Image (cartoon, rainbow, N blue to C red):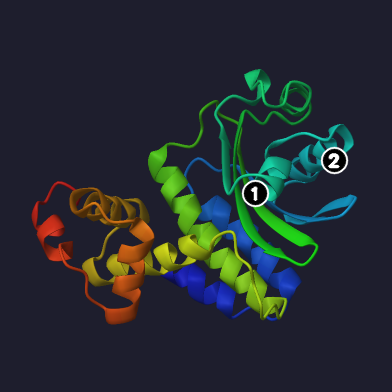
Amino acid sequence: MAAAARDLQEQRGPQSTLDLAVRLAVSNVDGCDAAGVTMARPHEVETPAFTEEWVAVGDRLQLELGEGPCLDAIRQQHTVYSPSLGYDRRWPVWGPRVTAETGAQSVLSFQLFTHHDTVGALNLYSRTRDGFHLDDRADGLAIAAHVAVAVAASMKITNLESALGSRTVIGQAIGIIMERFDLRPDVAFAVLSRISSTEERKMRDLAAELVDTGRLEGLDATLGEGVLR
């Protein structure tokens, strides 16, 4: 994950950043068979980067039908997950059609950023029903946080209103814990979550403290329990 973040920052321009982002999503999230980035503007939705052509087909269907997880992630929610597209009541038309036409069974979508009239989302698809487990969703969250920062930088967005503002700092904290203790992304996320629950503090505040100071009370003690390794 740390190497992925460095690679994203080294890309020269928005398109190369987006192309790498979708490849990294597939290679770093176990349940992900294909990925795409959706950009939405008033009356227009496009998919500038995708790993499989059927991802773009699914996105075009969402625009055509006016429903789907990418649109929900862009317009309403920061994260959208559907374990069974063919039976999801949120998208009664799009779900069965996308399953029939592409073979996609489940999807995980993250809103990346909002800026003026442009909104972005990272969409991960699986051809397995309930294809994204909790650790996969944690990995996807970390990837989305890094992608949001890299894409914003490559597009030279200076005043970024990020839907993943809190997730960005959480992603940075996860990276610190991973590197310092040689942990997998899902385990590092679980460590931060455990401290948040134990100390009854928001995860974003804990992450910001770790990023700002390099220290976090309860971190060593939590790892010392041994159950998260």
Of 49 and 76, nearer the camera is 76
Q: Is residue 66 above or below residue 215?
A: above
**Dot 1 amino acid type:** Ala
Of 95 and 162, nearer the camera is 162
Residue 219 place in picture, x, y as percent:
18, 63
Of 221 and 130, nearer the camera is 221
Checking the image for residue 35, the label placed there is 1
Is residue 1 visible to us here?
A: no
Give the left or right position of residue 162, taking residue 132 as reference. Answer: right
> Do the CB atoms of the residues marked 1 and 2 lie less than 8 Å apart?
no
Whichever of callouts 1 and 2 sits on the residue coming sooner in the sequence is 1
**Which residue is depicted at the point 51% across and 59% down?**
143
Task: Specify few, some or many for label 1: CA neighbours under 10 Å numbering under 14, 14-19, or 20 or more.
Answer: many
Q: Nearer the viewer, mark 1 or mark 2?
A: 2
**Which residue is depicted at the point 26% across and 53% down?**
196
Residue 126 place in picture, x, y as percent:
59, 36
Checking the image for residue 139, the label placed there is none
**Which residue is depicted at the point 52% across and 62% down?**
145
Q: Is residue 21 above or below residue 14?
A: above
**Dot 2 amino acid type:** Leu
**Which residue is depicted at the point 80% across and 63% down?**
117
Please identify the quarter of the rendering in which residue 157 is found: bottom right
